[in-house]
Image (cartoon, helix red, strand yellow):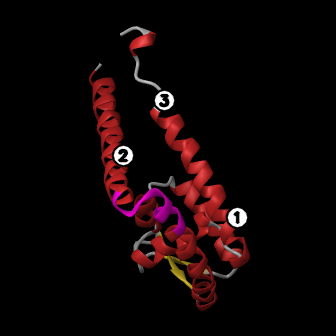
Amino acid sequence: MTMHQIPRPCVCTSVRRTARVLARTYDALLSNSGMNVTQLAVMRAIIRHPKEPVSHVAEDLEMERTSLYRALATLQRKRWVDLEDGTDGRSQSVSITQIGYVALAKADPYWVNIQTAIVRRFGYARWTEFAIELQRLADCANSVATSQSHRRAGS
């Protein structure tokens, strides 16, 4: 395949650029809550995985564990979360503190306003379809990564 036959623009660059714009928008509009969008996402993932290993939270967020631990360190300093040793002695679990729930309650109305405004401008039906397509794109990327790693392992 020649360079002019390669589909453009770059999928990864396009999605990352859009993610940065979205993150800046959410962070700016969440700023009065004292929380940024990454912290909000991590806190919500913790709620979805109570008493489970931190690795489950990382998987939920598609985040490297080291990146998640850095995010958790910030949340711990703010006293929004507690890390506890897991049952096997090798893993840890994380839980939201009472102060963390108060912080979430403060951030939630800001998030609702941002989310609603963006989806309203984008279009509710389009957003639903696009969310499905984003998941399909992630599945395609995972499939390519899996087939490439199998190909490398076999060579």
Kindly report the distance in space between the C-alpha atoms of the residues bearing marks 1 and 2: 27 Å
Query: What residue lies at 52% left-to-right and 37% top-to-bottom?
Result: 14
Q: Where does label 1 land, which residue?
A: 28
Against 131, is 114 above or below? below
The range drawn in magenta is 117-125
Q: Nearer the viewer, residue 115 or 143?
A: 115
Residue 93 seen in the current view: no
Which corner quadrant holds the N terminus? top left
- Image check: 83 left or right of 122? right
Which corner quadrant holds the C terminus? top left
Query: What residue lies at 48% left-to-right and 28% top-to-bottom?
Result: 9
Mark 1: amino acid: Ala
- The secondary element bearing badge 2 is classed as helix
- Front of the two marks 1 and 2: 1
Residues at circles 3 and 2 in contact by the CB criterion of under 8 Å = no
Numbered tag placed on residue 138 in the rendering: 2
Mark 2: amino acid: Ala
Q: Nearer the viewer, residue 106 or 123?
A: 123
Expressed as whole percent of the image width and height from the top left, the position of residue 49 reads 40, 75
How busy is the neighbourhood of tag 2: few (under 14 within 10 Å), some, or many (20 plus)? Answer: few
Query: Which badge, 1 or 3, comes first in the chain's sequence?
Result: 3
Query: What residue lies at 41% left-to-right and 18% top-to-bottom?
Result: 6
Judged from this view, the residue extending furthest toward the top is 2
